[in-house]
Image: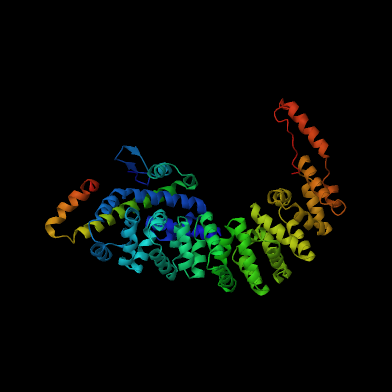
Amino acid sequence: MNTLHGGYDGADGRLGGIAGARADLAQELNGPLAVCEALSEQEAADLLNLFRSARRTEAAALAGAIDGMIGVLPRPFRTVTKRIMFRDLAN
Amino acid sequence: MSNLVIRAQVVLLARTLHVPPERLAHLERLGAAGLHELQERMAGIIFEQHAETFRRISRLVPFIPLTVSMPLVQRIIPPAMTGRAAGAVGVDHPKKAAETVGLLGTSYAADCVPYMDPASIGQLADVAPPEPLIRVVNEILRRRDYVTVGPFLAYATSNLIAAMERGVRDDEGLLLATAYAFSAESISAILRQLLNGPAQRVPRMMRSVLAGSPDLQLAALSVFARCEPEVIRAIGDILFGVGSPPAVDHLIRTAIRLGAVPELLILAGNLSRQALGKMAASPVFDDYDTMTAIVAALDGNTETNCWRGLFTLAARTGTDVQRRTARLLAALPDPMVIDLPTRATEADVWPMLLQLIAVADPTAQGRFGAAWATLSAERRAGLQWHIHEHHLDARLATITDAAPTMSVEEVFYKRRKRRRHLGTADANPADTWNPW
């Protein structure tokens, strides 16, 4: 993952950060957008950061919502229901 | 116009990213289209990220009675997540979706809407009864959350628009929400329904606009300016038909004060002859500052619709205002003055431009003549042609003397010579000459 601050990204062994933020944003958005050309590298890095954070937030909120709904089931059914319905997605 | 649309796109992007709009205020410079593109792509990815989860939830719907599941959803699930899931699940079970809104309660459903996929609303509206959706729209308008309604208008089907005309009674709210819509096509569709629908709401709406707050007037001008020409024309007939001179005066002053001159001019450029006459007769143009502000707002603007509005409007004002307008145009920076003939061609308003120049004082005429003398020989020939066609040779001698020209025959001769020189003499045998 990109560090967003120009640091060394240990995950894939390359120098990540602000220099490649526009390209990273394009990749995260499944392809380049014309509007991204108008962004500075700093702005692209910021947007990329916000977008990733939003995705994490939504994934956590959805997981919480599913847990909430499953929580109303009688206890013995909870784990098995979740495993049957959403196990592979959780992974 | 653009300010409202840009602001709406910033708010929508901020919602997608779960940050306050102020956090993204610096991105306003990307413009409405750029922000819209960015927001749609990001929202699409987020929806897609959970699509499989929603599909699996959707499969449960036939097995669990809504009367059991919905009270639980309302108690346990935050509206943001219900909104995200609602589009996908609703499209799979449209009949149940309408029932769901009733079971959830209008208020909770309205909380969910900002997080719904706007595209699913259109699909839902086609198969489910629209009344529950209209109740939700009314609740959102009651909360004055106009930005939320905007994106959905792009996906509103003709059925839903017709239902809105019947069921959304808040004239001001409907206009304010429409101002936040991005798609000009859907704005025209809504206005067309309001114009032609059985409720005939536009006259009442226009009275509300004329007597309304500056924000409402700004939103209304933004909406009108983005409609198709025939819709603007029909709206304009009603607006200036019901508007008293003081009310029209007030609307024009508001437009100038709030930076909506381009929208005002687009409206003017599409008015019927009668409505334009009423607008041009407004006493507001007797005020020296009015035309000064209007012309100043066009400095640097090359939008054809705006220039069409300026020329058609100014040409219908009294001679004094026309002369003053010509003087103001002459005082624009050189590139703007030099390009005025181009603006006139693009906007198809040569007669109006020449009329203004013809009544201009000698100093202003001299300025136009000197500026247009720098045009290419072919363009000077075009200028000469227009002046001749409108029988203004005598009155515009200052221009023709200052901008010496060549004959049309000479234009053809030089063009042929150039082609021969380039070896393309036979490339385009059907030679035509555009006077500009």
Vertical order, B27 against B170 (above or below): above
Residue at image point 30% right, 66% down: B103
**Residue at 81%, 45% in the rendered image:** B385
Residue A14's x, y, as percent? Answer: 34, 37
The C terminus of chain B lies in which quarter of the figure? top right
| Of B432 and B305, the residue lying toward us | B432
Asked if one can make out residue B261 in the rendered structure from this viewpoint, the answer is no
Front position in the image: B176 or B202: B202
Which percent across, then down, holds residue A40? 47, 47
Front in this rendered view, residue A86 or B25: A86
Is B427 situated left or right of B152 in this image? right
Residue B305 lies in quadrant = bottom right
Q: Nearer the viewer, residue B303 or B347?
A: B347
Q: Residue furthest front?
A: B198
Query: Measuring 74% from the left and 60% from the top, which residue is drawn there?
Result: B328
In this view of the protein, can residue B66 be seen by the observer?
A: yes
Q: On the rendered structure, is B228 left or right of B340?
A: left
Q: Is residue B109 left or right of residue B180?
A: left
